[in-house]
Image: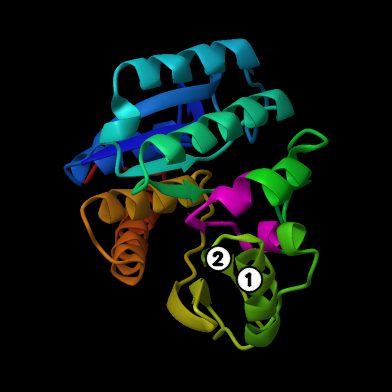
Amino acid sequence: MLVISIQSQVVHGHVGNSAAVYPMQAEGVTVAAVPTALLSNHPHYPTMRGTVLEAPLVADLLRGVEERGLVERAAVLVTGYLGSPAIAECVARFIEAAQKQNRSLVYLCDPVMGDDDLGVFVADGMTEIFRDWLVPLASLITPNQFELELLSRKTARNADSLLAASEIITDSGCPTVIVTGCALDDTPSGQVETVLCEAGALTRIATTRLPIRPCGTGDLLTGLVAAHLAKGSTVTTALRNAVERTYQVLERTREAGAEEMKLLAR
């Protein structure tokens, strides 16, 4: 059971691969982690050091992944924060080649572009690369509500409009959409939903909205979905397990009064 995970890495805190790799490993899955950025911390701190990697370096690392035979062995390939259009393009070419080499490979795309608080925080051109290239290659995607609206160019604030926006994604070639951090018109007060949109139907999973918002929760949930898919779970089962585990981490984080997610149980 191998997952290839292509996203950012930080020294302090838990976003990107620094949020996803350990939880995947804790589920018994081997992870080949490819960085797209090496940063001291996520950008919500007053300062941030490090850099987005140069696209030729990322491409060279991906060539090494191919040379070690990891594409043929992988069950799931995950992409998250990609850093620049040049990186996104080389990753898209890698995925196209990987899908030809391994016909059973599941591509899980987390189209990291922005959120309600910050708006769009990626470089110009990234939304179009996700919409026109990466998302159509994907088996499933895990946008937040804001990102789904960017991809679909459609408001998604109730169940019907969320389904309609997801069907735009389905029509582009990606059959399954998981929307995170949903607050729909009929979401009960004090709750937040994760919504699976598949085959024209919605599966809504609600949890209590905790009074914290650490960075990286979407990266954590995506990694856990990937791990369970790699172990052979259905998408619905993988998602339910991932939501439960993510909520446990958030409860532990709240109880500890921590700024960053408490991935460890002790």
Q: Is residue 80 left or right of residue 238?
A: right
Query: What residue does disc 2 label?
Result: 179
Q: Which residues are magenta?
A: 134-148
Along the viewing direction, whichever of 200 and 207 lies nearer the viewer: 200
Q: Amino acid at mark 2?
A: Val
Farthest left residue?
28
Q: Mark 1 touching mark 2, by CB under 8 A? A: yes
- Image height of 56 relative to 255, above or below: above
Q: Quadrant of the N terminus?
A: top left
Among the 4 quarters of the image, the one containing residue 186: bottom right
Which numbered disc, 1 or 2, marks the residue that appears first in the sequence?
1
For residue 243, the mark is none
Which labelled disc corresponds to residue 166?
Answer: 1
At 33% across and 69% down in the image, what residue appears?
A: 240
Relative placement, left or right, of 31 versus 49 is left
Three-letter amino acid code at the position of disc 1: Ser
Residue 176, visible in the rendered structure: yes
SS for callout 2: strand
Real-space Cα separation, disc 1 to disc 2, in angstroms: 9 Å
Residue visible at 70% across and 60% down?
Answer: 146
